Amino acid sequence: MPALAVKNLHVAYGSIAALHGISLDVQKGETVALIGANGAGKSTTLRAISGLLPVSSGDVLWEGRSIANLAPDRIVAAGIAHCPEERHVWPHMTVAENIALGAYLCRSKEEVQRRTGMAFHRFPRLRERAHQLAGTLSGGEQQMLAIARALMSEPRLLMLDEPSLGLSPKMAEEVFEVVRSINVHGVTVLLVEQNIHNALSVANRAYVVETGRIVASRLSGELRNDPELLRAYLGG
């Protein structure tokens, strides 16, 4: 049984259909990428899974139980965290305060402190900047902060939306090393990423999304060696 199973998912923005029956699965311990052009429906898929968009029809199963249209906080409590596109850190709060926001479901100050300590252990650069305003960080540091905040809920599935957006190649490489490390340490990852090279370098498998539909599913190595498919759906 897959950890996550999306079945015939339909989502609309008002009267405009955005997803047209997307189905995918993610096995426990995998990193799976959703790749495709801008506007293909990748981010919409993540937002529907995490409860930020209503599901018109179809289902989302997490560890065998339906979570379609649950409130976002209940989905976080169930073990899924969503690190959004463009990071959305709070610029006028410190790094430490931003990280603590990710533990809003924790019931004790001691537990928040324990998780914050683990976040700083994983991201030593953030520990050095704990009292610095988040808005003064570089783009890469803000991305690491957004990931650290998402991990504060101790998810079993981490969904990442465009983690390399706007980053230099060197900083993007650092971020993807973090993604690899997170996965190696037992967190399943569902990744949306426009940079195909980055996505396929960390993913076990990938789905190609086009106009709200899955049009291909391959092992990452197979996709890398199929330039015709990549050119057909992604322009190269």
Image (cartoon, rainbow, N blue to C red):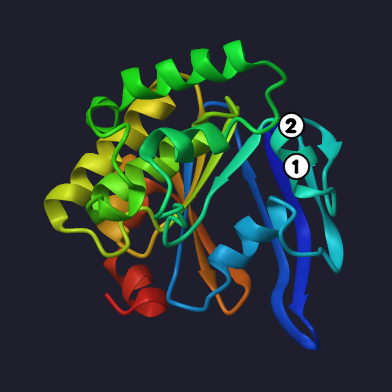
**Image x and y of residue 11, in percent:** 76, 71
Q: Amino acid at mark 2?
A: Ala
Give the residue pinned by disc 1. Answer: 73
Q: Is residue 57 visible?
A: yes
Which residue is painted at 44% across and 52% down in the image? 89
Which residue is painted at 18% across and 49% down in the image? 171
Who is closer to the viewer here, 44 or 207? Answer: 44
Who is closer to the viewer here, 164 or 8? Answer: 164
Examine the image and state in which quarter residue 52 appears: bottom right
Q: Is residue 221 visible?
A: no
Q: Residues within 10 Å of mark 1 (few under 14, many from 20)?
A: some
Which residue is painted at 68% across and 23% down in the image? 106
Who is closer to the viewer here, 216 or 20? Answer: 20
Quadrant including the N terminus: top right
Give the residue pinned by disc 2. Answer: 77
Q: Are marks 2 and 1 in contact (CB under 8 Å)?
A: yes
**Image x and y of residue 27, in percent:** 60, 33
**Image x and y of residue 190, in percent:** 52, 45
**Does 12 appear above or below 61?**
below
**Does 54 appear above or below 154?**
below
**Does 63 appear above or below 21?**
above
Examine the image and state in which quarter residue 12 appears: bottom right
Quadrant including the C terminus: bottom left
Secondary structure at badge 1 equals helix
